[in-house]
């Protein structure tokens, strides 16, 4: 029988986990608005710095399964602390970089640290909530709120820091946050670990890394090189072959890194699909909107960053509403309604985006998009945690977020390719991208309706 959670312990754990998740999400978007400045100061083309964004996303997504496995195998607290320290050192390396290759290498190390931190942060919350689904729903809502705010605040904070200091500060700002996260995490309880299993699934780790890296790399390079390029289609074939081999191996090995039994749950599969579509639309849209605000509407980096302010405020309020709602009715309704609200927000962008759109028209969509996401994502995350054993919560969170990060990278690549470089192309590309987002979110709502249970989910 699970013990009843100590509310103060759960609050402390949620705060500690949220600090780490916040810096992970912050570094997804804070770089976008700084690329022109970084390119100018390091003497390279903006296109050449695509990997400043993509290297982080690729390593992050490719190693999430490994991070979740490590957290479940050796304890989420221990792994989470190690990830924070690595992320801090990588951020320092980024801030001190003297050229683009060093900066990209630092971003790859950040991705490695993030891949360990994210699943372990959710595992810590799931353990601290121990048998209390309502409190877990609220904790996940706060955790998601911090992450959502950080994603939306990235362009704002990046623009402000560049305006008053230099681009290096967008990485160095992570250092004090990491210190606070370490101090808070030291007070958390360690998570339970499953019974000892034979060895370490080295083959599964390698195949998973190759599959995710090759597939995401294909998406990233398809725009600049073209899919007919041998490197691109070779990566696609390698990724698909490695993915097939990964599933085949995990189904037969005695100590799999990823228990395929997780996918027997319709709720788990539905939540992962929902999260992938949500990230695909949101990450791609934020990337294109950053270009649209600066290249089409002529906003400075600081003003473009401030233009995203409605996204930040909306995420905080709506995520907390979602946690309260999920605790009472379950995940299905918040996921469905959230996806549809999100779709309406993207529909508004499709209708109003021009070369001279007044900001107030954009602001309405900037409120509805995070409003919908803020309802759906905490509900989706809670649905995943509620349908796995606590000792598997790390790998379950890793699967969810690996899928979401891969989908986010695909959204950035696809929406960025549609936008192009010329201002006239950006407007057309934005309209096409938002139309794709609307269709994707309607599909997400349908997935929630057909896979997520209608009633409250009991904790495992």
Image: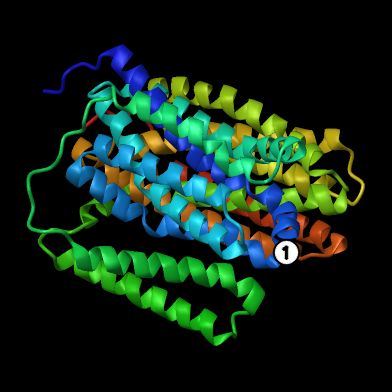
Q: Position of residue 208 (x, y in %)?
A: 32, 64
Q: Residue at x 85, y 44 (%)?
A: 299
Q: Quadrant of the N terminus?
A: top left
How was the colour assigned to the protein in this rendering?
rainbow
119 left or right, relative to 292: left
Q: Position of residue 219 (x, y in %)?
A: 55, 68
Q: Residue at x 73, y 45 (%)?
A: 347
Q: Quadrant of residue 16?
A: top left
Q: Position of residue 10 (x, y in %)?
A: 32, 19
Q: Quadrant of the C terminus?
A: top left
Q: Quadrant of residue 459?
A: top left
The residue that label 1 is drawn on is: 43
Taking 42 as reference, is 449 above or below it? above
Toward the viewer: 176 or 46? 176
Q: Residue at x 41, y 22 (%)?
A: 138
Taking 41 as reference, is 123 above or below it? above
Q: Residue furthest right?
A: 356
Disc 1 packing (10 Å; few <14; some 14–19; many ≥20): few
Is residue 455 in sight in this rendering?
no
Toward the viewer: 214 or 159? 159
Is residue 5 in sight in this rendering?
yes
Q: Position of residue 40 (x, y in %)?
A: 76, 58
Toward the viewer: 133 or 74? 74
State the count of labels.
Answer: 1
In what element is the residue under mark 1? loop
385 left or right, relative to 298: left
Q: Residue at x 18, y 46 (%)?
A: 73
């Amino acid at each position: 029988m699970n013990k009843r959670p100590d509310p103060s312990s759960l609050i402390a754990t949620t705060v500690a986990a949220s600090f780490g998740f916040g810096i992970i999400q912050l570094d997804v978007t804070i770089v976008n608005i700084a690329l022109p400045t970084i390119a100018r100061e390091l003497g390279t083309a903006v296109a050449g710095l695509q990997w400043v964004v993509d290297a982080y996303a690729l390593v992050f997504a490719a190693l999430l399964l490994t991070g979740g496995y490590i957290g479940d195998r050796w304890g989420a607290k221990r792994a989470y602390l190690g990830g924070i320290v690595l992320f801090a050192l990588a951020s320092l390396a980024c801030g001190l970089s003297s050229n683009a290759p060093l900066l990209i290498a630092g971003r790859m190390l950040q991705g490695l640290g993030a891949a360990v931190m994210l699943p372990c942060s959710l595992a810590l919350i799931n353990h601290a909530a121990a048998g209390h689904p309502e409190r877990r729903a609220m904790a996940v809502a706060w955790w998601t709120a911090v992450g959502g705010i950080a994603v939306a605040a990235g362009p704002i904070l990046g623009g402000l820091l560049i305006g008053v200091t230099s681009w290096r500060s967008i990485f160095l700002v992570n250092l004090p946050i990491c210190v606070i996260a370490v101090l808070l995490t030291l007070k958390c309880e360690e998570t339970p670990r499953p019974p000892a299993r034979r060895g370490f699934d080295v083959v599964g780790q390698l195949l998973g890394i190759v599959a995710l890296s090759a597939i995401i790399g294909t998406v990233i390079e398809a725009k600049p090189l073209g899919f007919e390029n041998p490197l691109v289609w070779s990566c696609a074939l390698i990724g698909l072959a490695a993915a097939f081999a990964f599933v085949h191996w995990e189904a037969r090995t005695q100590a799999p890194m990823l228990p395929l039994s997780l996918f027997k749950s319709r709720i788990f599969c539905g939540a992962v699909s929902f999260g992938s579509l949500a990230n695909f639309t949101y990450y791609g849209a934020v990337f294109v909107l950053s270009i649209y605000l600066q290249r089409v509407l002529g906003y400075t980096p600081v003003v473009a960053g401030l233009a995203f302010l409605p996204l930040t405020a909306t995420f905080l309020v709506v995520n907390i509403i979602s946690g309260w709602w999920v605790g009472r009715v379950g995940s299905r309704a918040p996921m469905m309604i959230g996806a549809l609200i999100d779709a309406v927000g993207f529909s508004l962008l499709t209708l109003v985006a021009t070369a001279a759109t007044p900001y107030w028209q954009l602001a309405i969509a900037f409120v509805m998009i995070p409003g919908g996401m803020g309802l759906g994502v905490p509900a989706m995350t809670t649905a995943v945690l509620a349908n796995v054993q606590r000792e598997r919560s790390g790998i379950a969170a890793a699967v969810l977020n690996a899928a979401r990060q891969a989908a986010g990278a695909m959204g950035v690549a696809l929406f960025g390719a549609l936008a192009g470089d010329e201002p006239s192309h950006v407007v057309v590309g934005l309209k096409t991208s938002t139309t794709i987002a609307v269709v994707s979110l309607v599909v997400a709502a349908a997935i929630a309706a057909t896979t997520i249970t209608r009633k409250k989910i009991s904790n495992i």
